[in-house]
Amino acid sequence: MQYTDIGDITVEVGQDHIETAIKIYNELSKLSPSRKVSWKKHKEMMEVEGYFDSSTTESYRQLIKRERAKVGELPEKAKFAELASQGTLNSIKEEIGQLYFHKREAQDDFLKLSRLKREMTRDVVLLDILSESIKESDWGSIELNKGKYIPSSGNVALATLSDIHYGYEGKNNYTTEELEPLLDKYADKLIHECGIAGVEELVIAQLGDEIENYLHGEGSRVETQQSSAKQIVGVTKLIIKFVNKLSDYFRIKYFSIDGNHSRTNANYKLSVDGETWTEVHREIMSLTFENSDVVEIIDGDSPHHKIMNIDGTNIMCVHGHRHQLKNETTLATTSVNHNTDLDILLGGHYHSYKVTEVGNDKYQVITGSIKGSDSYSEKIGKSSTRSQVLILFYPEREFDIRQVKM
């Protein structure tokens, strides 16, 4: 058994290594309320056991995943988010109980208890709503595709899935019922365009704002009839169908980025990185496709961005609310900040398609939205068609940026 380490070095590991790695993985998973495993911690524990040939790379993680599958250690699908929320709830309750017992012995513990009580009220409400939303939703049986139409060309493309705003029901008659056929239409167009280009691997970049959420007071509540928990469960179901359909024709890599509508706290000043509805979405997607041979759910470099090198082209994906995509110096500034010579800076947020060449074969790209125009865009005179972005990559830093209308 082998994997590829940093620097494209092939590393061979034995059966004893694999057995130890699986045992450590299982123990770390039990200790995590979200069931996620820190691979940095996993590597440290492997070294304690005398195995210095483990790694945190994606290749090593996939090796352990495959070996876990062989011995039947992978978890069942269906209720991951419910388990994660219940685990978090229990951990909060346990912490509250411990602190209450010691509060008269130490003032520090008493202060911590008070803070946790304030946080617990909000967290428990969110977790209970999420759990109920999953129970109420008919997930059915999802049969994962096997990739029977995938070519072996090696060609790669990237398609955006940005600004869905599931849950919005406003003036443009954009309802949750109309979203599924829209995504189905988009998938058909990708299959057609990428099929002509002989694409083998399709990277799907979910650039944030997959739900409408409550961020703008009573106005947004009028146009949003569902709770944020129900929204994230509903949109994730549709994205699973979208990704699964495409996986019959291409090998899929999928990642998600937080948008401004992703946060669980309406006050952005009180928001914490990682505490978003998109994190719930990522967890459900990871569990659903954990056994897939053709779909890989990958992580971003942070909740807010991902940098990829595709056939020599450096592309950075963001949502857009933290990056001034309409400022033509942003790509250069971002390249310096991330110590990477970026060729493309790709984001959403503005709901209006735009490609700006800001240097010699350097571009800032804003994708349109799947939501399309709403009451706010009509008010400020910025209406635009529903569209997304498809980028076809070729060797030697050649690429083709296209608008895909819906």
Image (cartoon, rainbow, N blue to C red):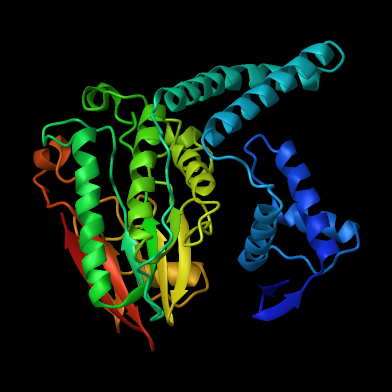
As drawn, is 87 to the left or to the right of 191?
A: right
Q: Nearer the viewer, residue 180 or 273?
A: 180
As drawn, is 396 to the left or to the right of 12?
A: left
Residue drawn at x 42%, y 25% is 133
- Provide residue 330's location: percent of width, then percent of height: 35, 66
Q: Nearer the viewer, residue 359 or 343?
A: 343
The answer to whether residue 283 of the structure is visible from this angle is yes
Q: Which image quadrant for residue 44?
A: bottom right
Q: How many marks?
A: 0
- Provide residue 177's location: percent of width, then percent of height: 21, 34
User: Could you tell me which quadrant the N terminus lies in?
Assistant: bottom right
Q: Is residue 274 above or below residue 136?
A: below
Q: Is residue 116 above or below residue 48?
A: above
The answer to whether residue 320 of the structure is visible from this angle is no
Q: Which image quadrant for residue 329?
A: bottom left
Residue drawn at x 47%, y 46% is 285
Residue most extreme to the bottom:
396
- Provide residue 100's location: percent of width, then percent of height: 77, 13
Q: Is residue 217 above or below residue 330?
A: above
- Provide residue 301's location: percent of width, then percent of height: 53, 59
User: Could you tell me which quadrant the C terminus lies in?
Assistant: bottom left
